[in-house]
Image (spheres, rainbow, N blue to C red):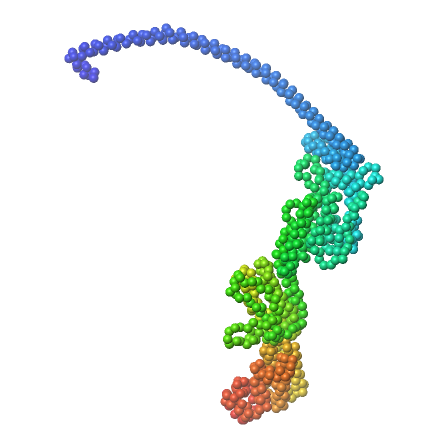
Amino acid sequence: GSLVAAVLAHSGRLDKEDLGTRIGKLSRRGEVCNMINKKYSEFLPSMQSAEELVAQVEGLSSSIDLLKAGIENEVQRDLNVAVAEFTELKQQLERDSLVLSVLKKLQEFDAAIKEYNTALLEKKYVVAAQQLEKARSSLRALESRKGFELKILRALSTELTVQTQNMLYHLGEEWQKLAVWKLPPSKDSNSLESVLHSELHLHTVPPKEEEVAGPPVAAVLQAFAVLGQLQAKLKIFGQLLLKYILKPLVSYPSLQPLTEEQSEVLILRFQSKAGSGHSSPVEVFEKIKLVFEVLHKYLLNVPLEQAVGQAEEGRLRLAELLGDMIWEELSDCLIQNCLVNSIPTKTSKLEQYIEVIRSTEEFEKALKDLKFLKGDTTDLLKYARNVNSHFANKKCQEVIVAARNLMTSEIHNTVKITPESCIALPKLPDPRAGDQLSTQRASEPLHAGVETLEAEPKLSHYTFALPTCRISASVQQLMELAYHTLLEATASTDQCCVQLFYSVRNMFQLFYDVVPTYHRESLQKFPQLAAIHHNNCMYIAHHLLTLGHQFHYRLTNILCQGAATFVDMVPGFRRLGMECFLAQMRVQKGEILERLSSARNFSNMDDEENYSAASKAIRQVLHQLKRLGKVWQDVLPVNVYCKAMGTLLNTALSEIATRIAALEDISAEDADRLYSLCRTMVEEGPQVFTPLPEDDRNKKYQEEVPVYVHKWMSFKELMIILQANLQEIVDQWADGKGPLAAEFSAAEVKSLIRALFQNTERRAAALAKIK
């Protein structure tokens, strides 16, 4: 722009404008002069005065600081002196207060001891006990002060202990006068005669001849309570009350409590009345209630004084305190020795038990009125009300105990069971009757007629009957017990029904476990007992097949879902009987083989000694079989008897035949004597089959010996060989089609021929035909 202006200035066009601008700038210089004037003529003087004022203020401030420092030094020195004086005065005050407090407590202790002594002389035991507690409280306050110990405190503590024991001694003396026990000698304390000599004397009125009237029983007991010694005294009293009065009343039905009031004493004693059996709960409750009423009137209706410092509300009475101590033990005694025995054993008597429940309720209510019991229902009443459960438990326990007694009784006491005499099926209700089925009381005798099936053609009356045999009388009673228990279950509550049903199952399970163990030695030693046990198990299994079905529709619905059965136990009982009898059979087989082992292998029969030994062995075996035939006679079922005797006879014949067939050389004399021995077995062997007592009826079974003795025909063929010549043996063989070939193999026949005959051409020809 200046370049342009310079150019224009040369041209003369900006002269006029440039002049105006310069005039305007010159006019502004007056403002600058005004500003300079104001700064130097007006501001500077005021600034100087302000600076002077600041200097004055700073001087004044330093004076103030000096004054403040002087004041603080003076006041602090005076304040420290004042605080030290105040602290010293405060400590002095605390020491004086502590001394005053200690002196006050000592004065209280002394005053309490003096008042205690005065009250004790006047036999005001409650006041004396309270003063002792005040003294004890003062002493505790003194002992609790830390850092302040007085030698006198030990002396005060000793004095308090002495006075307390003195007080307790006096109270004990008074208590012994107020409640006097006259007890029998400790040796016979549990017998009825000694219990009759037990007495409790309560001296509720002080003797008139004493100058100072004796304290009432309440004062003595309250004083004990204040001193905290009542529980110990009352516990001893409660135990004596239980042992010599309450428990005998429960245990001995003939005891009757008797009270006798005299002018100064109440006597509680017993008298005996004729009585036997268990105590009735109603009678026992009345007796015990009478005792508590007497005790409440003369002893227990006492409100207990509270010790010093305890709340006054909710004061206990002596009866409540005693009740807390002895009720649990008394309740257990009443349950175990009274209520347990009163539980009925039959459903029909359950309704009568309502009277016992009502009596129990009245008994508890009376004790609550006497403040002996609190408001809650006790175990005694709960036990009485739960009679159905206890009835079931007691019934089940009786069933099991009775069953166990039967199981541990002698097995050999037997009864004869025939198809006509077996326990019959009770008449079963119609399964379609449903819930409308009336509960049938099965009063039919167990030996009633058997129901016949309606279908045609009819089966034999004895198709499913148990064969005739002998069983233990105890097992028959056991089965009848099972039937009667199940009949009882049908008329019981659901809970009881289930318990009784399973008790019957447990009864049979107990038989399964107990009998083989309890009678183990007898079952192993005596063949007849093993046979009876076999029959017992089969008899039980026979009835278990249908036992559950008979009661299926008469038991509770819980059991009608298929649980009411005993069929699952049948295989176990059958196996139990079979195993026992088979074990006995093994024993008898072992004895037979042992006897035959003494026959010297039936060799060299021409020797008299050998022949005698073999003959003796044969006779012993026959004797053993005859003895078994007798002990099993009329015991085992006929078919079992014949199978058992046939098996044992077969064992003997098989052993004899095997030993003879094993001989390598049999002379003619040997053969004759062997034949004689075999003939003895064949002639006398069938005679051991005597399953029935009637001899004429046994001939049928003796003729059927080949049916039961597998080796019978083999043995007879052996006898033929012993007496036959070579041609007869060949004829008996008949090219492997004869009777001899049916019983012996070709090798066995050849061995016998070689043993019986010398080596000749005829023997060789005969041997050639045996093939």
Query: Hey, which quadrant is residue 620 in on the image?
Result: bottom right
Determine the residue positioned at 77% across, 48% down. 259
Q: Is residue 549 left or right of residue 198?
A: left
Q: Nearer the viewer, residue 728 or 139?
A: 139
How many discs mark residues in the rendered view?
Answer: 0
Quick one: 577 or 421, which is closer to the camera?
421
Q: Position of residue 504 (x, y in %)?
A: 60, 64
Q: Position of residue 244 (x, y in %)?
A: 75, 51
Q: Quadrant of residue 133?
A: top right
Instruction: Identify the residue at the far left of this view.
Output: 11
Using residue 677 as the reference point, say whether residue 227 is left or right of it. right
In the image, what residue occupies the spot 66% across and 45% down? 374
Residue 168 horizontal/vertical position (percent): 76, 40
Looking at the rendering, which quadrant does residue 751 occupy? bottom right
Q: Is residue 330 above or below residue 224?
A: below
Q: Position of residue 580 (x, y in %)?
A: 61, 71
- Residue 707 vs 116, above or below: the answer is below
Image quarter of the N terminus: top left
The residue closer to the viewer here, 128 or 642, is 128
Q: Is residue 579 visible?
A: no
Image height of 161 relative to 390, above or below: above
Which residue is at 63% across, 58% downward? 350
x 59%, y 15%: residue = 74
Q: Is residue 438 visible?
A: yes
